[in-house]
Image (cartoon, rainbow, N blue to C red):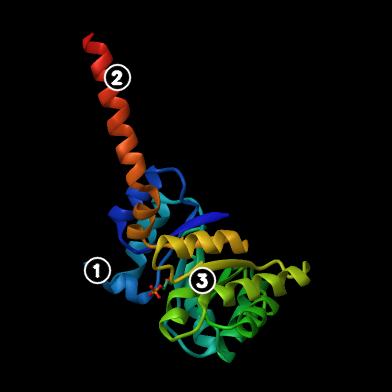
Amino acid sequence: MQIFLDTANIDQIKQAHELGIISGVTTNPSLLSKEATADYESVTRKICAIVSGPVSVEVLSEDAAAMIAEARVKASWAPNVNIKIPITAEGLKATRVLSAENIKVNMTLCFSPNQALLGALAGATYVSIFIGRLDDAGHDGMQVVEDIIGILDNYPELDTRVIAASIRNPLHFTYSAMAGADIATVPYNVLMQMIQHPLTDIGIKRFLADWKSVAKK
Ligand code: E4P
């Protein structure tokens, strides 16, 4: 399993990258809008200079021809740029064309096994399943991830990787790993929560206290 960081924040990306456990980054227009600049290109170039793995950048166009043109420009920003395309009829058409050009597509906003399977059939390198948003809408996001992994396992000729996305808490990450998701893309705060455990903090304090008490004798 790999971890991607789900943010467009450069400081968070630098800090997470230093941990040595991040394999890529996913952004989206909402994440970018939280940053000081709306300059998608300069932010993407900065991220790609920090992280050598895949960096997903989303298209804003809605028809296939415009998505393709936009994707080609964005893919030229850095060799590790992947293009996020929403799962729509137009998105599927664009994915087929871009995949044939070796531009890697992350088919995004997938909420059902059928959507993910269609993305895989169109040649997407990744399908992103939005667990948190499914949970918010009263569905079982983890079950959808499990179903998609099971379906793709039936068809090994489909070389599409499953990204567990819209992760809101450490349990989403754990269950994604148990389900066999190829990647989980996690926000920085969830990554920090995953590192911590109160018993680790207590253990460190106790070890240091014991060591100091012996050192005094
Ligand atoms: C995935 O690539 C998306 O950027 C992200 O996981 C969406 O998460 P949200 O539902 O918390 O906005």
Instruction: Work out whether mark 1 precedes mark 2 in sequence or the reverse, and give the earlier one.
Output: 1
Please, is residue 104 above or below residue 191 in the view?
below
In the image, 38 versus 144, the foreground residue is 144
Give the residue pinned by disc 3: 83
Report the quarter where the N terminus lies: bottom right
Asked whether disc 1 touches disc 2, contact meaning CB atoms under 8 Å apart, the reply is no
Report the quarter where the C terminus lies: top left
**In this view, the mark in front (3 or 2):** 2
- Work out how far the residue at label 1 is from the one at label 2, CA to CA, in angstroms: 49 Å
- Work out how far the residue at label 3 is from the one at label 1, CA to CA, in angstroms: 20 Å
**120 sits left or right of 166 in the view:** right
- Inspect the image, locate mark 2, and give the three-letter code of the amino acid beneath it: Trp
- Inspect the image, locate mark 1, and give the three-letter code of the amino acid beneath it: Thr
Q: Residue 170's x, y, as percent?
A: 42, 60
Instruction: Work out whether mark 3 precedes mark 2 in sequence or the reverse, and give the earlier one.
Output: 3
Give the residue pinned by disc 2: 211
